[in-house]
Image: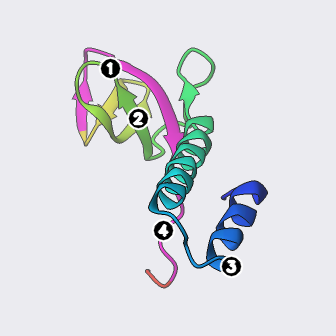
Amino acid sequence: MINKTLKERYQRLIDVGFPHPTLWTEFMEDCIHEIDTQVQKGWISVEDDLPPLNEKILAFDSGGFGVLSARYSTRGWYLEGELDNFQHVTHWTHLPSPPKGVD
């Protein structure tokens, strides 16, 4: 969720008719930074906690694969459905809710 300050800045830009392109660019960069900050808050280190067994989650694999779907089981990490014996997962987060109107 975009914070109150960004909402107020957006409304001011609308009120003055999106004046200078630099102001718009700065606003968009601040929005991207805020969204990234909110996303980062959702990542959990595997040193702090592990996901529920066999729940599909997003994992960050520092071994070169980056962010991908995964499951943690008693046998280890399954990345994109394949057992990963190298254990490079450093962080995980729950999947977002599916889009509204999709079964």
Left or right: 34, with 8 as reference point: left
Q: Residue 102: x percent and y percent?
A: 44, 81
Q: Which residue is mark 1?
A: 62
Label 4: element kind: loop
Among numbered discs 2 and 4, the one appearing first in the sequence: 2
Among numbered discs 4 and 1, the one appearing first in the sequence: 1
| Amino acid on which the number 2 mark rests in the picture | Ala
Q: Please report the residue visible at 69 percent of the width from the left and 62 percent of the height from the top.
A: 9
Question: Is the residue under label 3 in contact with that under label 2 (CB below 8 Å)?
Answer: no
Q: Please report the residue visible at 25 percent of the width from the left and 29 percent of the height from the top.
A: 83
| Amino acid on which the number 3 mark rests in the picture | Asp
Residue sitting farthest toward the bottom: 101
Choose top left, top right, bottom left or bottom right for residue 10: bottom right
Q: How many marks?
A: 4
Disc 2 from disc 1: Cα separation: 10 Å
Q: Please report the residue visible at 48 percent of the width from the left and 55 percent of the height from the top.
A: 22
Q: Nearer the viewer, residue 84 or 32?
A: 32
| Amino acid on which the number 1 mark rests in the picture | Ser
Among numbered discs 3 and 1, the one appearing first in the sequence: 3
Q: Which residue is mark 3?
A: 15
Q: Residue 95: x percent and y percent?
A: 49, 51
Disc 2 from disc 3: Cα separation: 42 Å
Left or right: 73, with 35 as reference point: left
Q: Nearer the viewer, mark 2 or mark 3?
A: 3
